[in-house]
């Protein structure tokens, strides 16, 4: 496949670091022109990726209209670009694996449809996944196929694909190893986040030099505050105190141990790890803004985790930011959130959602 130089801003603790943290602590909101220059200044050679190509085209179309002079951002806009583009890069690579599995199991060449950004093509592939899931060679292949369903079934609106994904999720939750997981004290996790929103424990790395500490903070709130034991790839271990605030992947790997990739510190991987294990409430921005009062009266509570997503191609959503409910606003019937990368203690969800297309609220078991 042809190599092509395109803009991509990498995020994720175990990826190669390209000296991009300078942008995270810099005032990037002075002018839109400066933003565009910085957005276009970070490049890396990767295989041609139609997902990123379309996102770039859509970005160029809206760049002139978008106002980046916003000092109340939840995340550094450039850091969020890193997350979006790294996630799209991951989606594309995983989707290629799906095409290979379907070709092997069904003897069908569905490569073009598997990586197509057309909704109807994705739906057709998801139906093929349902037909072939039981003949996947092993659990690793099934996990790859399940990942495709997780990425696209909900936003496609296809009932058959969503129902199949939900059946698989229900089976996973009934597995003996899942039943042995220690219960999560969500209220205590929310209180911990409220009280520690501006603190950085030396028991965990601080990604302040990278510009993205949101998933690390929520993971700590769940583990330290809510008592959720580390399990599987959702874990973080300290080797030494040399690099408490790592500036690159080399420093991180010298002082800390994470899986690669890690759901402890990657929004995408956190979503992939915890969504199948949780009860999930999903809302578009318009849906939440119109119905937040009735949503507030439901079962969502302090300590539940909020995943913020942005879109590409008009329907595919990519998780870009993570926060945790730290307080309740009974007067406005809204939830207040704590989080990093910009330190927040009790930020209204109605304000936070304005910059996003979709949210998923997770009740961690």
Image: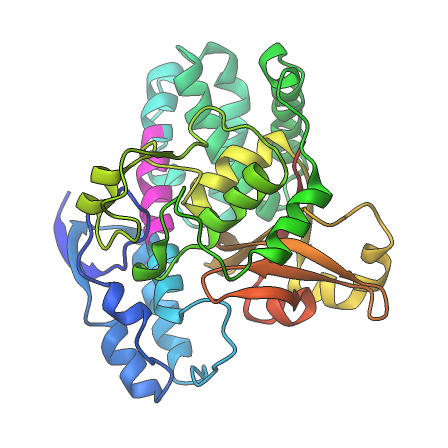
Relative to 154, is 96 above or below? above
Relative to 144, is 43 above or below? below
The x, y position of residue 265, in whole percent, is 41, 44
Image check: 275 left or right of 35? right
| Residue 139 seen in the current view | yes
Q: For residue 229, which quarter of the picture?
A: top right
Q: Residue at x 69, y 43 (%)?
A: 188
Q: Which residue is drawn at 20% across and 46% down?
A: 251
Q: Residue at x 45, y 47 (%)?
A: 216
The x, y position of residue 70, in whole percent, is 48, 82
Image check: 313 left or right of 297? left
The x, y position of residue 301, in whole percent, is 76, 48
| Front residue of this view, candidates 269 and 128 | 269
Q: What stretch is highlighted in magenta?
A: 86-97
The quadrant of the image that shows the C terminus is: top right
By secondary structure, the bulk of the magenta-drawn segment is best described as: helix
Q: Residue at x 77, y 48 (%)?
A: 300
């Amino acid at each position: 496949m042809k190599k092509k130089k395109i803009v991509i801003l990498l995020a994720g603790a175990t990826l190669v670091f390209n000296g991009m943290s300078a942008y995270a602590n810099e005032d990037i909101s002075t002018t839109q022109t400066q933003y565009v220059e910085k957005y276009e200044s970070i490049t890396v050679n990767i295989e041609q990726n139609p997902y990123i190509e379309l996102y770039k085209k859509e970005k160029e179309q809206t760049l002139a209209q978008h106002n980046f002079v916003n000092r109340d951002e939840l995340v550094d806009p450039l850091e969020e670009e890193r997350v979006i583009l790294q996630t799209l890069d991951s989606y594309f690579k995983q989707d290629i694996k799906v095409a290979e599995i379907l070709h092997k199991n069904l003897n069908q060449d569905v490569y073009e449809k598997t990586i197509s950004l057309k909704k109807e093509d994705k739906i057709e592939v998801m139906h093929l996944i349902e037909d072939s899931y039981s003949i996947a060679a092993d659990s690793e292949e099934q996990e790859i196929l399940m990942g495709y369903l997780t990425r696209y079934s909900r936003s496609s609106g296809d009932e058959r694909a969503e129902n199949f994904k939900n059946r698989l999720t229900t089976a996973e939750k009934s597995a003996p190893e899942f039943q042995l997981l220690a219960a999560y004290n969500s209220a205590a996790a929310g209180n911990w986040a409220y009280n520690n929103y501006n603190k950085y424990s030396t028991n965990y790395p601080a990604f302040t030099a990278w510009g993205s500490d949101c998933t690390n903070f929520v993971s700590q709130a769940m583990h330290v505050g809510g008592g959720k034991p580390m399990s599987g790839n959702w874990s973080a271990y300290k080797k030494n105190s040399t690099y408490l605030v790592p500036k690159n992947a080399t420093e991180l790997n010298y002082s800390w141990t994470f899986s690669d990739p890690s759901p402890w510190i990657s929004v995408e991987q956190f979503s992939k790890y915890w969504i199948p294990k949780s009860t999930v409430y999903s809302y578009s921005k318009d849906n939440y803004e119109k119905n937040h009062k009735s949503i507030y009266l439901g079962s969502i509570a302090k300590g539940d985790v909020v995943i913020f997503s942005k879109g590409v191609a008009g329907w595919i959503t990519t998780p870009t930011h993570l926060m945790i409910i730290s307080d309740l606003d009974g007067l406005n019937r809204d939830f207040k959130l704590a989080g990093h990368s910009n330190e927040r203690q009790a930020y209204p969800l109605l304000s936070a959602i304005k910059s996003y297309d979709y949210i998923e609220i997770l009740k961690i078991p």
